[in-house]
């Protein structure tokens, strides 16, 4: 049974056409994956459905009746709810308060906390969620917070649930939990739309895939069981992509970056326990692991942002110590974990961001300490061209750029300084396939120019595709070292979660 | 001076008296911050309340109507803050300070224009101490409460009502949600702007009330700059009391106590020393993070519609 029909939807913004006559339908008890690159128009289409923005033309039918929602609350009242990518929760409130606020039970004036709590508990048990109703939201993990968001829409009696990039912030295990929840919701009669650009997850959860590209509908009836991820990605990007193909190192040289006995203590606990490894010139060493197992601490120690309890770090045989700027000067580049909080100053221009951290070098700065505006702008123009950064100009604020282009600015800044070694953390998080492919190519080129690359990523596929050698990190310890292809995805997943898959001994520790 | 029961009574009674304007103004601050708007304009709204309550009482000859006047104009001044900050998105510290500066300049001007006087207004009808004989018969409590103005009891009532409003009603929960995360509030269909305006208007009314207490509650005339920074103290008390009506009540008593000590001990210690104590203590509390004066997370954030 058809529950939503959107006909010939167009959306024109000044200067660009976001959607060109797109049709979209959703059936009852169906999970549809709305697949597309960033900027393909999938979010715009859902914002139109949800009443967050008005279409330039087109018609929408909900349960057979024509509708036009002016505000999200109109859609919510009809039973169409959205779980936003950035959670809309109040950290200082309890789970119950977050769920009920705005639609509280009780008389007209007073809040019936007992009834509210009971209703939430009923909801939790009906859908078999695992959340403590009385916990403050700030104490919850990201996965739990997402469940609170889903409870919020269920509490509002949603029939149609739109999830915007729901897996972007989740660990692999949490993704499994989420999918189990979504299947249960489907069994209960809900219809679900997932906005995503992740192919594997689309194949895993969707009943039907709708592909958008550049505001056009490419295909609205793809059976995920009948296509490969490669075919899907080509539909989405419009040309052939090859993310999985490995390009092994051609000439691995001498040891470049050597880390010995790295121990990091935080809040009285050892977050990294006596870790040692070495990376050679022309090699990518990947560290796989679920986030929170010491990755952040390793990155911060190797870039001089944090003083570890113990570490001997040598670069081409010379010991590196001191502040983060000394590490940078020694030739250790850094692509940080979170581009907005650590990698960029988003209010500042593309140009300024392209020299951040290197702004004192004689190329950009006179001896008297004045910035050389002309040289800097020429340099920025060159990087913008070389690294295909899509921005109106080098003077645009970084905040106006898409995530992929923001990441390209960091990549251009660090890679063009030709670092001897580089620490790269989650280089393609929240970045679309086109930009991902580009960034991967850049990483491999940098490696082939002789740099030693340490790749830390929560995306196991990425680590497996790029690395020449892979370490698995679990609770601050390296639990395995392998060559690519030596271990299967399942085996690595097991190692990452502490199930100690002993490859050599072939036995399991408890 | 001998230290005896008389002194003790007088300290307690005086503490409560000096607390009232602080309670009312800081309670106003609660509403403002708990709707997501900084409360730096309290001083100006309070001063406006002092002046206009005198004017109201002068025109009508009735202290209660004077109070109403004061509250109304406190709200009018608060709307200046609201329009600048909420509608035109001026930084709330700046719009708050504008209100303070405007009130400091406008009240002497109006004093001159309306009454043709400078420095202070003519004497008007004011609140009288209630003559409750029966209260004097209650030991201790009766003596202390009997020395209070009727507005003291109104202030206590307002604290309780405000607390119930914020923590026990639906609108209170929604208002707090706006202050914590306006985007989240907006996505569940709340009119963020309306809640913010409401919170600021309430802060104006209560600050106006506080000002009226100074002019026609404790005295019977308006004196230029008679709030003497109490609005700023209320801002501190509000943070100190964790933006909670009950916390604010406690904080006001604390500051009122030092105010009372100061009047009583001014012949023994340098009064400045006694006056400094609550501020030093507050600084210590905030610096050491003991009070955890973390406000609602969404104060000053706007939602695009």
Image (spheres, rainbow, N blue to C red):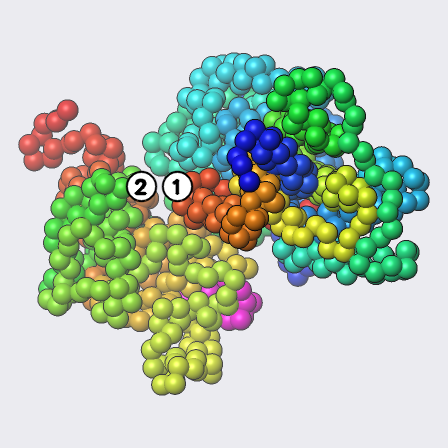
Asked if B261 appears above or below A440 in the picture, the reply is above
Q: Which residue is mark 2?
A: A291
| Observer-nearest of B243 and A338 | B243
Q: CA distance from mark 2 to mark 1?
A: 25 Å
Q: Residue at x 44, y 74 (%)?
A: A380
> Mark 1 belongs to which subunit?
A
Q: Residue at x 87, y 44 (%)?
A: B124
Image coordinates for residue B195, horizontal then vertical, percent = 70, 38
Image coordinates for residue B161, horizontal then vertical, percent = 68, 26
Q: Which residue is mark 1?
A: A229
Asked if A228 appears above or below A317 in the picture, the reply is above
Main SS, magenta region, reads loop
Image coordinates for residue A105, horizontal then vertical, percent = 64, 19
Image coordinates for residue B50, horizontal then vertical, percent = 78, 47
Mark 1 is surrounded, within 10 Å at the Cα level, by few (under 14), some (14 to 19) or many (20 or more) other residues, namely some
- Whichever of callouts 2 and 1 sits on the residue coming sooner in the sequence is 1
Q: Secondary structure at mark 1?
A: helix
């Amino acid at each position: 049974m058809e529950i939503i029909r959107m006909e010939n939807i167009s959306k024109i913004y000044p200067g660009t056409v976001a959607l060109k006559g797109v049709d979209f339908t959703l059936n009852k008890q169906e999970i549809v994956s709305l697949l597309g690159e960033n900027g393909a128009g999938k979010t715009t289409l859902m914002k139109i459905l949800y009443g967050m923005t008005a279409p330039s033309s087109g018609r929408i039918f909900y349960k057979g009746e024509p509708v036009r929602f002016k505000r999200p609350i109109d859609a919510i009242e009809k039973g169409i709810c959205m779980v936003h990518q950035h959670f809309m929760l109040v950290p200082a409130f309890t789970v119950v308060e977050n769920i009920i606020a705005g639609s509280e039970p009780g008389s007209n004036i007073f809040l019936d906390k007992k009834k509210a709590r009971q209703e939430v508990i009923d909801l939790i048990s009906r859908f078999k969620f695992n959340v403590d109703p009385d916990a403050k939201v700030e104490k919850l993990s990201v996965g739990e917070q997402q469940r609170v968001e889903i409870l919020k829409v269920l509490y509002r009696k949603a029939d149609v649930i739109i999830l915007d990039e729901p897996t972007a912030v989740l660990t692999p295990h949490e993704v499994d939990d989420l999918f189990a929840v979504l299947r249960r919701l489907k069994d209960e009669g809900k219809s679900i739309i997932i906005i995503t650009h992740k192919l594997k997850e689309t194949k895993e959860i969707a009943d039907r895939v709708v592909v958008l590209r550049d505001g056009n509908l490419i295909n609205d009836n793809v059976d995920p069981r009948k296509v490969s991820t490669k075919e899907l990605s080509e539909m989405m990007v419009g040309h052939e992509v090859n993310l999985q193909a490995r390009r092994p190192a051609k000439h691995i040289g001498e040891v470049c970056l050597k880390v010995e006995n790295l121990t990091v203590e935080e809040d009285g606990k050892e977050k990294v326990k006596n870790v040692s490894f070495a990376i050679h010139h022309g090699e990518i060493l990947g560290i796989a692991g679920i986030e929170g197992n010491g990755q952040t601490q390793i990155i911060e120690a190797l870039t001089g942002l944090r003083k570890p309890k113990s570490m001997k770090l040598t670069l081409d045989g010379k010991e590196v110590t001191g502040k983060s700027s000394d590490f940078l000067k020694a030739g250790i580049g850094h692509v940080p974990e979170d581009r907005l909080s650590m990698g960029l100053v988003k209010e500042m221009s593309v140009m300024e961001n392209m020299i951040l951290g290197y702004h004192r070098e004689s190329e950009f700065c006179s001896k008297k300490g004045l910035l050389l505006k002309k040289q800097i702008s020429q340099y920025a123009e060159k990087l913008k061209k070389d690294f295909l950064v899509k921005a109106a100009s080098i003077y645009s604020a970084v905040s106006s750029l898409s995530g992929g282009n923001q990441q390209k600015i960091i990549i251009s800044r660090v890679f063009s300084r030709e670092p001897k070694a580089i620490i790269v953390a989650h280089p393609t998080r929240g970045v679309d396939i086109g930009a991902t492919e580009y960034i991967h190519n850049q990483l491999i080129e940098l490696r082939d120019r002789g740099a030693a690359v340490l790749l830390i990523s929560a995306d196991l596929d990425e680590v497996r595709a790029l690395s020449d050698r892979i370490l698995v990190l679990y609770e601050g310890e390296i639990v395995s070292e392998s060559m690519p292809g030596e271990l299967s995805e399942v085996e690595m997943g097991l190692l990452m979660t502490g199930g100690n898959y002993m490859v050599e001994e072939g036995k399991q520790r408890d | 001076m001998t230290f005896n029961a008389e002194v003790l009574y007088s300290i307690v009674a005086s503490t409560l008296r000096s607390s009232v304007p602080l309670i009312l103004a800081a309670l106003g601050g609660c509403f403002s911050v708990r709707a997501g708007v900084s409360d730096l304009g309290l001083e100006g709204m309070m001063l406006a309340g002092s002046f206009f309550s005198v004017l109201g009482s002068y025109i009508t000859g009735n202290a209660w109507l004077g109070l109403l006047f004061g509250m109304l104009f406190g709200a009018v001044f608060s709307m200046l803050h609201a329009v600048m900050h909420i509608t035109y998105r001026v930084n709330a510290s700046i719009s708050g300070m504008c209100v303070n500066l405007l009130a400091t300049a406008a009240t002497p001007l109006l004093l001159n224009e309306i009454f043709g006087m400078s420095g202070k207004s003519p004497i008007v009808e004011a609140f009288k101490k209630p003559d409750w004989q029966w209260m004097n018969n209650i030991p201790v409590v009766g003596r202390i409460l009997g020395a209070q103005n009727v507005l003291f009891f109104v202030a206590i009532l307002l604290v309780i009502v405000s607390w119930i409003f914020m923590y026990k009603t639906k609108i209170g929960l929604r208002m707090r949600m706006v202050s914590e995360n306006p985007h989240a509030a907006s996505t569940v269909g709340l009119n963020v702007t309306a809640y913010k305006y409401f919170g600021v208007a309430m802060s104006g009314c209560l600050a106006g009330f506080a000002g009226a207490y100074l002019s026609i509650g404790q005295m019977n005339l308006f004196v230029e700059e008679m709030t003497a920074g109490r609005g700023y103290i209320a801002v501190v008390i509000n943070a100190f009391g964790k933006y909670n009506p009950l916390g604010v009540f406690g904080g006001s008593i604390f500051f009122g106590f030092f105010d009372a000590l100061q009047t009583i001990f001014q012949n023994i210690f340098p009064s400045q020393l006694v006056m400094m104590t609550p501020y030093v203590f507050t600084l210590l509390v905030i610096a050491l993070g003991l009070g955890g004066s973390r406000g609602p997370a969404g104060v000053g954030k706007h939602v695009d519609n």
